[in-house]
Image: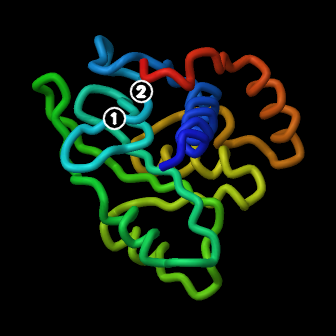
Amino acid sequence: KSTYGKLFERLILGTVLQLLGFKRVAYPPSENRMVFWLSSKDGARESDATLLIRPGQAVRFDIGFIGRGNPEISKDKVSRYERELEIEGQKYYAATFIIVDRIGERSTIVEQAKAIDGTIVQMSMSFWPQQLARELSSKVDFKHEICRMRSSCLEEYLRGAVAKVSVEGLGDSA
């Protein structure tokens, strides 16, 4: 992937995960609750972010710009990760989340993701960080105030939360 694409992935994922209350750490992590790191290869495939909810529970993220073009790219993303992950000798159940710019009209990617217990979130949808939080809530028992927020309050909340996020170092590998 291009350098700019990687930087964008880090800025988007890093910002959204921080505003959802997760702390960015270096790999290997010294903590295993509510932390994440960016761009790592744990297991067979590289992920754009790995999130540790609590001991034994993780989420692996891939972010991609699929567009209307090749649905095979999405299919690869859906089947990319194993359901179990080992980090520093500890096993984690790993949910798969794929964040895409948009899904084509005739795409079957959502059904494919459900078949492997994966989740797709579209950035083209209004307030997609709230949808991401809600999906995390249903998959890994994640709790955050954004999940219950009315859409009329969401834009102001997101603006304020993003303003508080530190983006320093998000382009680094740490």
Residue occupying the point 51% across, 78% down:
70
The kind of residue tagged 1 is: Ser
The residue that mark 2 highlights is 37
Marks 1/2 in contact by CB < 8 Å: the verdict is yes
The residue that mark 1 highlights is 40
Label 1 to label 2: alpha-carbon separation: 8 Å
Residue occupying the point 89% across, 46% down:
152
The kind of residue tagged 2 is: Trp
Under tag 2, what secondary structure? strand
Would you place residue 47 above or below residue 159 in this image? Answer: below
Measured from the top left, where is residue 68 in percent x and y? 63, 77
Q: Residue furthest top?
A: 30
Would you place residue 61 above or below residue 33 in this image? Answer: below
Q: Residue furthest bottom?
A: 106
Local crowd size for mark 1, using a 10 Å CA cut-off: few (<14), some (14–19), many (≥20)? some
Quarter of the view holding residue 156:
top right
Camera-side residue of 13 and 148: 13
Q: In this rendering, would 164 be left or right of 66?
A: right
Local crowd size for mark 2, using a 10 Å CA cut-off: few (<14), some (14–19), many (≥20)? many
Measured from the top left, where is residue 168 in percent x and y? 63, 15
